[in-house]
Amino acid sequence: MNSQEIRSKYLEFFKDKNHKIVASAPMVIKDDPTLLFTNSGMNQFKEFFLGNTEPKHLRVADTQKCLRVSGKHNDLEEVGKDTYHHTMFEMLGNWSFGDYFKVEAIAWAWEFLTEVCKIDKNSLYVTVFEGSNDADQLGQDAEALELWKKIVPESQILFGNKKDNFWEMGDQGPCGPCSEIHVDIRSDEEKAKVSGASLVNNDHPQVVEIWNLVFMQYNRKANGQLEVLPAKHVDTGMGFERLCMVMQGVKSNYDTDVFTPIIREIETITNSSYGKSEETDIAIRVIADHIRAVSFSIADGQLPSNTGAGYVIRRILRRAIRYGFTFLDTKEPFMYRLVKTLSDTMGKSFPELKSQKGLIENVIKEEENSFLKTLDQGLVLLDTMIASSKSKEIDGRKAFELYDTYGFPIDLTALILQERGFSLDEKGFDKAMQEQKNRSRSASEISKEDWTVLSKDMEQEFVGYDLLQTNVKLVKYRKVTSKKDGEQFQLVFNVTPFYPEGGGQVGDKGYLEASNGTIIYITDTKKENNEIIHFSENLPDNVTETFKAVVDEKQRQSTEANHTATHLLHQALREILGTHVEQKGSAVHSKYLRFDFSHFSKVTAEQLIDVENFVNARIDGNLPLQENRAVPMQQAIDAGAMALFGEKYGDAVRTIRFGKSIELCGGTHVKNTGDIWHFKITSEGAVASGIRRIEAITANAAKEFYFENNRILSEVKALLSNASNPVKTITSLQEENSKLKKEIESLQKDKAKNLKGDLQTEIQSLNGIDFLAKKVDVDAAGIKDVSFEMGQNKDNLFLVLAAENEGKVVLSCYISKELVAARNLNAVTVVKELGKYIQGGGGGQAFFATAGGKNADGIEEAIQKAKDYLR
Ligand code: SER
């Protein structure tokens, strides 16, 4: 079976067992503060396990794009070195939300592997949780053990500890014991020599875990304690690439048809061959793996950047580039050339790769170019470091600087040092790294108390589309403390008018009013695991009473104007620039809006005006809001609604329509485009290759913008003698100004010439030296010109000149070169000495130096001292 067929077989199998087949959630997570990337199939269902939301289907199956490169599940450094770990991989999964449990999960997994996939039963091993003696005090998973015993010989059942057989998504959240299924794909001869059982969970490349069946029965709380979940669930995850390896009878994931087309392409592009040396093989695997992670992230809307998820992506891409650079000798961008092959092989199952191919290529190419430049600069710095090092060991702190400031990878530093016969002070490097980590950790550390639950009724209702105030009751609350925001409270209500940050739109602010009139300010609203969390600085005195919750209406209204304008802007850009324009991000604040979109060149000034006019025409058209809160997804798409890749949509969606603009959107909007009043673009620029950003303002911010401009114009007019046409008047002033400047310059030159003649006559002979010290009336440039001209053809001149221009004093000393040598004189010493009197300092060369100062009263004394000095 090829990989397409294997994927379909899995989904068909569970469809037959009454599972709803759903789409993969985006790999980049946008609304969960605890995770940057989907690291397991179950992430998108977290809220069901926690009981925050009722699932529509109790049985679900899918293939999920996952990325394990940060946080609790991080495989990055392993990837490429072995043949079965990946950054991005597909996880096949089936779930039960409070429906079936261990009996069915175990039986079906076995049936699928042995009957559908026809994997030899004797090559399979299963593991069971042995229990724990730590604070959790968990017993053995006897239930699973009994079930396995019925179908698997006991010699193939093994026990595992908490690390391997108790699955937790993160430090908090749903968790439970698990049974893993491992497969031994070694040859019969090898199997006869060493038992497969002894190799399970022992990092053997041919005895690997393929499926993990998690039996979710607990929730790990912030204080570390486990609480039993209200209902029991199943969460299984199978490594798709590993299953392909087993089914296709090969010994490495990279030998399956998931990877071979990419590897062939790498061989062609880099003129290398896979399977010849361990070093190049690792590099090829790293690149084949990483191109997937990076391309899928970009397709999901996450571009490489300097912070957060974007930084993780940048690091992955850079890791691949430097493996190519070091082991495949790639000194030019090459990764972007793999995108086509990737999109050809996976585009059918993941159409986002196909539709965004051009963008993905562009972004990767630009990153490659800039990192290759960094590598070049880093190599130069490293050379300097080596040249100036007094010992054969290079200071770890210096290497850290290279890593931290220039992004130069430390393993590359170590490798180059080794090649040149130097070594790296690794301890010093680690120490510097640790210190930096400590600094950033303490800045970002957040401690959360456990929720205090006041009501078990967890259903929450958002009424903010219709109401800006309503009576609410607290369902639960907790205290969170962080260095950044200090102490805050998070409150959850039974019903709320507060819009939680999402879809680019900021969260609502406002207040709660208690019955005694006390006000508690709500500073922000966010969504976490599908719960609406309100942030406040304090807690009400009486948490059980009913409060009046009031949204800050002014802020909401300007935010709504900006949100609707964003939709109109999107429509305008597609109309004016073309339908290649796709939304790549947006930020809708109360004061401004920001819209990122794919487009390959600068938007011209004329196009920007067209865009503004297009949007303003729709604002003037007073288009009413047409909102539909529950349209079947397909129906919305058929009606032409814009859906974004990288967003998670349910079966039923909300559509927002203003005239011909229709978007899937959960945000809040004006009732009529007329409420936006006016739309004004304030900037246009590039965010990344192929991605542009427009910032704009509307409503009151636009009014203020025009008022402010008007005020400035009035001030300008007041300064002009002829104010009827300020542009014309200012242009002629500018012309006049530049003409005057030129005249002054030429006058200064003449003055310097005349000065020279006057000064020649004043030269005295002092100890056989031609000496003159004098205050003159020219500028600094003039002083230099005069000094050099007077010095021409003279071999014994000692000239000190000083001048004052607009409060600034300049003092210079010119000494003929012959004199410098013959009498051991130095103009720098002279100006330093004399500079004291004008309260200044300076420098220059032995034959000419200047000092700048601010004390004009000291000029006479300085001149006097010049004579003394020479005497
Ligand atoms: N959540 C489990 C895992 O990731 C099973 O899906 O291994």
Image (cartoon, rainbow, N blue to C red):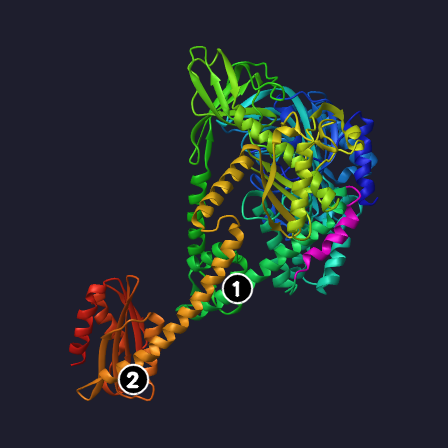
Question: Which image quadrant shows ligand 1?
Answer: top right
Quarter of the rendering containing residue 307: top right
Does the magenta run of residues contain 345? yes
Residue 379 visible in the current orientation: yes
Q: Amino acid at mark 2?
A: Ser
Does the magenta run of residues contain 336? yes
Q: Where residue 399 appears, x then y in whole percent? A: 46, 59
Q: Could you tell me how many numbered marks the image carries? A: 2
Q: Where residue 536 appears, x then y in whole percent? A: 46, 24
Mark 1 — residue? 377
Q: Amino acid at mark 1?
A: Gln
Local SS, label 1: helix
* First to last magenta residue range: 333-349
Relative placement, left or right, of 268 versus 849 is right
Mark 2 — residue? 816
| Nearer to us in this view, 706 or 751 | 751
Q: What crowding class fits label 1: few (fewer than 14 Cα within 10 Å), some (14-19), or many (20 or more)?
A: some
Main SS, magenta residues: helix
